[in-house]
Amino acid sequence: MLETIKSELVLFHLELQKNQLVTWTGGNISARDSETGLVAIKPSGVLYSELTPEKMVVVGLDGIVVEGALKPSSDTATHLYIYRNRPDLNGIVHTHSTFATAFAAVGKPIPPVLTAICDEFGGAIPLGGFAPIGDEEIGKEVIRSIGSSPAILMQNHGVFTVGKTVRSAVKTAVMVEDAARTVFYAMQLGELIPIPDNMVIRLHKRYMEEYGQ
């Protein structure tokens, strides 16, 4: 069931590790199959080096496991709540990447002070309020606070990124940490220089409509 998706999930989880966005067994990725609506997600507490397609867990949007011998991620309810409320999404990534999570720990969004942030996020990377782990509360706060951004920092917790594909959600997770690292170092040097709102919009529009092939 969802064999291609499960194989892709193994590779994308390794990308999180390669980009130093996760440690030990923390973090997870899920993918929704647009045809069946079923979701494949990382099993709880399994090392990234031990992940295989067979170990991925397939669940319905109601949370019922339909395939897999292992327990799904403890963040499954969060992922499913987001999918139920955002039918445009097919990929979700959760990390505790160091620099981005540092902003979450002090309750600060990441401001659009770099052209790359404007390009990727179209504004500040927003901050969601604190919510307990294990139920739908984090998912509710993500939906409430993420707006049009593909990423959100959850206060005292970590990062969630979303996308129309798993690949785009993983790319966003990499870019969140890259932006957070640069902004953190910039803050040690002095005052951040804001980019005017009209230029933020212009840069994002150019990136979305003209960048790449």
Image (tube, grey):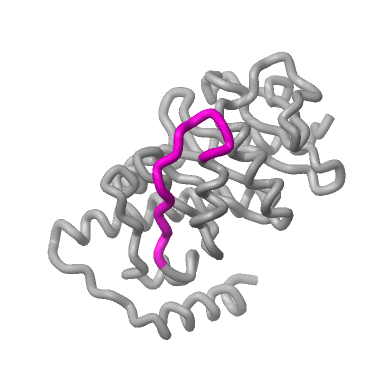
| Quadrant of res 113 | bottom left
59, 135: nearer the viewer: 135
Span shown in magenta: 124-137
Q: Is residue 20 visible?
A: no
Q: Is residue 141 left or right of residue 70?
A: left
Q: Is residue 166 left or right of residue 152?
A: right
| Image location (x, y in percent) of residue 138 | 51, 41
Q: Main secondary structure of the magenta part?
A: loop
Q: Is residue 209 left or right of residue 186?
A: right
| Image location (x, y in percent) of residue 25 | 48, 24
x 25%, y 54%: residue: 184
Query: Is residue 132 shown in magenta?
Result: yes
x 59%, y 26%: residue: 73
Q: Is residue 68 left or right of residue 126?
A: right
Above/below status of 100 relative to 212 = above
| Image location (x, y in percent) of residue 202 | 48, 83
Question: Which quadrant, please, contains the N terminus?
Answer: top right
Above/below status of 56 relative to 143 = above
Q: Is residue 179 visible?
A: yes
Above/below status of 20 relative to 202 = above
Above/below status of 60 relative to 202 = above
Which residue occupies the extreme top position in the image?
A: 69
x 64%, y 24%: residue: 72
| Quadrant of res 29 | top right
x 28%, y 59%: residue: 183
| Quadrant of res 198 | bottom left
